[in-house]
Amino acid sequence: MVNVRRLTGKDAQGYHALWQDARRRPAFPFEAAGDGPPEAWLDGPAADPDYFVLGAFAEVGELVGLASLVRRTHPRWRHRATLHQIHTARDSAEDLTALLTAAVAVAEGLGGLRHVELVADRDDARLLEVARLVGFERCEDLPGVVQFDSRAYDPPVMVLRLGGAAVGR
């Protein structure tokens, strides 16, 4: 059984350890987890209703997965959110499924969202497959969709339509 909830500054130690584990993956394009210490980074966004850092916890309370969900803030784009920086420490489809399912539930609860984009590691076949099973569909690759430290990355992007939204609507 995996429990998923929004992280706070109290989770900073586990968050930092799991983030360091994620950075060791060669395909993981994100080199920093935010500005300042994890406590400040988690408590700052926690007050923002459009930004979520979700954590998956094992039965023993160990943090085993992370995902960030960010709703676009511009009025013309508020119907969209991005799910990214997804990482699980254990090679467990259950952890990943619980994390993605909880992220989708958070997105559905925000109201007004029509779709969630998922940005994945190109080499993470497990994430791509679990996302597909949860309902995400693969989009065409978007060159330079992620820009970080003057570098462009071309990770796969998948989309989940919410509330029966049709493609192109």
Image (spheres, rainbow, N blue to C red):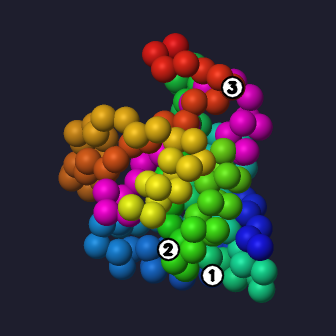
The residue positioned 47% from the left and 59% from the top of the image is 127
Res. 32 image quadrant: bottom left
Residue 132 rendering spot, x and y as whole percentages: 50, 47
Query: In the rendered image, which quarter contains the N terminus?
Result: bottom right
At numbered mark 3, what does the secondary structure look like: helix, strand or loop? loop
Q: Is residue 13 left or right of residue 157?
A: right
Mark 3 vs mark 1: give the one in front: 3
For label 3, count other residues whose C-alpha is less than 10 Å away and answer few (under 14), some (14-19) or many (20+).
Answer: few
The answer, for residue 162, to whether it is visible in the render is yes
Q: Is residue 29 left or right of residue 39?
A: left
What separation in Å lies between label 3 and label 1 (alpha carbons)? 37 Å
Q: Is 51 or 4 nearer to us in this picture?
A: 4
Mark 2 vs mark 3: give the one in front: 3
What separation in Å lies between label 2 and label 1 (alpha carbons)? 10 Å
The residue positioned 68% from the left and 61% from the top of the image is 98
The residue positioned 72% from the left and 59% from the top of the image is 6
Residue occupied by mark 1: 13
What separation in Å lies between label 2 and label 3 (alpha carbons)? 32 Å
At numbered mark 2, what does the secondary structure look like: helix, strand or loop? helix
Residue occupied by mark 2: 19
Of all residues, the one furthest to the top in this rendering is 169
Q: Is 1 or 16 nearer to us in this picture?
A: 1
Question: Image height check: is 125 above or below 37?
Answer: above
Amino acid type, residue under disc 3 in the picture = Gly
Residue occupied by mark 3: 163
Question: Image height check: is 45 above or below 95?
Answer: above
Between discs 3 and 1, the one toward the N terminus? 1
Amino acid type, residue under disc 1 in the picture = Gln
Between discs 2 and 3, the one toward the N terminus? 2
For label 2, count other residues whose C-alpha is less than 10 Å away and answer few (under 14), some (14-19) or many (20+).
Answer: many
Q: In this picture, which residue range is highlighted in magenta?
A: 105-124
Res. 13 image quadrant: bottom right
